[in-house]
């Protein structure tokens, strides 16, 4: 799989991965489906709308499985900037620090669910 090296442009591979992943996520790993699914989806969509364009771009690359250093190279930013974007993504998506969960995985699951 190749990833676009043009800043500001999400690769077609990320769209394909997101599409395939949304079909193959185990129900045990997927976000819980309590309440009305339309309301949940709308709420999750609202959460993703909180993200800036750059944060959505970083999250898409995280969803592709890229490391922070790979994301930094692709976006022509420092690795520290990537860490900062990811930290703010967790905050904006209301993903708390937890000993039981991996926030990076939770963020990707929310991205896929949208």
Image (cartoon, rainbow, N blue to C red):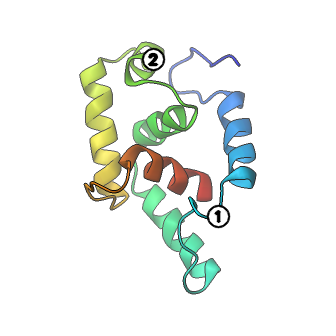
Residue 82, position as x, y percentages in the image: 33, 28
Q: Which quadrant of the figure has residue 67?
A: top left
Residue at (47% x, 56% y) in the render: 48
Residue 36, position as x, y percentages in the image: 60, 85
Q: Which quadrant of the figure has residue 55?
A: top left
Q: Residues within 10 Å of mark 2 (few under 14, many from 20)?
A: some
Quick one: SS at disc 1? loop
Q: Earlier in the sequence, mark 2 or mark 1?
A: 1
48 relative to 34, above or below: above
23 relative to 87, above or below: below
Q: Residues within 10 Å of mark 1 (few under 14, many from 20)?
A: few
Q: Nearer the viewer, residue 62 or 12?
A: 62
Task: Tell me if 45 is positioned left or right of 73 in this view.
Answer: right
Quarter of the image that includes the N terminus? top right
Task: Tell me if 4 is positioned left or right of 12 in this view.
Answer: left
Q: Which quadrant of the figure has residue 32?
A: bottom right
Residue 6, position as x, y percentages in the image: 56, 16
Residue at (50% x, 25% y) in the render: 66
State whether residue 93 appears in this view. yes
Residue at (38% x, 58% y) in the render: 93
Alpha-carbon span between mark 2 and mark 1: 30 Å
Q: Nearer the viewer, residue 95 or 73?
A: 95
Residue under label 2, please give it. 70
Quick one: SS at disc 2? helix
Quarter of the image that includes the C terminus? bottom right
Which label sits on residue 27? 1
Residue at (51% x, 66% y) in the render: 44
- Asked if the residues shown at circle 2 and circle 1 are in contact, with their CB atoms under 8 angstroms apart, the answer is no
Q: Nearer the viewer, residue 35 or 59?
A: 35
State whether residue 114 appears in this view. no
């Amino acid at each position: 799989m190749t990833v676009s090296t043009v800043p500001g442009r999400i690769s077609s591979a990320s769209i394909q991965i997101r599409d395939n992943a949304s079909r193959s996520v185990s129900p045990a790993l997927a976000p819980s489906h309590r309440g009305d699914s339309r309301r949940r989806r709308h709420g999750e969509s609202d959460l993703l709308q909180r993200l800036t364009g750059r944060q959505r771009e970083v999250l898409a690359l995280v969803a592709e499985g890229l490391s922070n250093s790979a994301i930094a190279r692709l976006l022509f930013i420092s690795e520290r900037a990537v860490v900062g974007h990811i930290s703010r993504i967790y905050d904006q998506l209301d993903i708390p620090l937890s000993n039981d969960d991996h926030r990076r995985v939770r963020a990707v699951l929310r991205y896929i669910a949208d």
